[in-house]
Image (cartoon, rainbow, N blue to C red):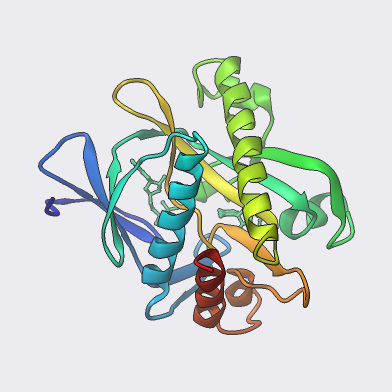
Amino acid sequence: MEKQGLLYEGKAKRLYNTEDANLLISEFKDDLTAGNAAKKGSEEGKGVLNCKISTQLFELLEKHGIKTHLVKTLDDNNQLVKKVDIIMIEVVVRNIATGSLTKRLGIKDGTVLPFSLVEFYYKEDALNDPILNDEHCIMMDLVKSESDLEELKRLGREINSILKKFFIERRLNLVDFKVEFGVDSEGNILLADEISPDSCRFWDMDTNEKLDKDLFRQDLGNVKVAYQEVLNRILK
Ligand code: ADP
Ligand code: UDP
């Protein structure tokens, strides 16, 4: 399958049309951004690492019955995916409080949450991705019905329990993550976009070392070394 015209260029990926109207090629870029692109950088090889990590995690989730957009990996940083209408809600699942949750609610950083918390954010850079409640989602027509919201929550929790267990076996705490879903040409809700250290927080269970995009966000260390370590543990 060959790339045809560029459909969309985002902060971390390029999407290309293909000869099949239902399929796209998703190319992972080396660029890194934080604070809705207020901070920008690039790390050669980051795109390849994220493509490999995301491929492994999507295949793991597929094995556990989660439907995803992934058709196959074409090469080191290109995936063939089903084209979907992206639901403009970022589904965030949290196991440990950090980041915006601690800032918003004053919860101490590192607090283990009593249950996995699912949150919705409006996927709209111009508004800095504000948090949404269920009624906002319905009012803004971001989903068709309340049952779709329940399905997003169920999928978020299910993905969390599969990934959390997988990473505990690799001595990594899955602190929190963001996922995106879309609707395919047959009306199925599919997991889309990516799951990588750009969109998840991973803390080493023994040292508490961060192995994710916070290294870039907070100028704490080398992203590539950390992402490679995440991939090595996934492949162990
Ligand atoms: P952003 O748009 O936030 O800068 P990316 O650089 O990762 O993010 O761009 C990828 C874009 O492609 C995202 O907006 C994402 O919602 C969208 N996307 C991901 N998977 C699919 C898919 N299978 N079909 C259509 N759009 C997708
Ligand atoms: N996240 C993301 N994209 C975003 C916002 C958040 O992938 O646009 C991820 C982030 O990497 C973390 C989780 O969602 O794993 C929760 O992020 P948080 O709300 O704490 O925001 P942040 O501190 O990143 O601003």
Picture residue at 76% right of the left edge, 50% below the top? 95
Q: Position of residue 47 (x, y in %)?
A: 38, 69
Quadrant position of ligand 2: bottom right
Estimate the x, y position of residue 186 in percent, counting from the top left. 31, 21
Q: Quadrant of the C terminus?
A: bottom right
User: Residue sitting at 81 percent across and 56 percent down?
Assistant: 102
The image position of residue 38, as x and y in percent, is 53, 67
Seen in the image, is 126 located left or right of residue 193? right
The answer to whether residue 132 is above or below residue 185 is below
Q: How many marks?
A: 0
Answer above or below: position of 78 versus 205: above
Q: Is residue 140 left or right of residue 70?
A: right
Asked whether 171 or 40 is in front, the reply is 171
Can you say whether 206 is above or below 106 in the image? below
Question: Residue 115: x and y, percent?
Answer: 82, 40
Q: Work out whether residue 205 or residue 215 is closer to the camera in this orientation and state it.
A: 205
Residue ranking furthest to the front: 236
Q: Quadrant of residue 97?
A: bottom right
- Give the residue at x 58% y 24%: 151
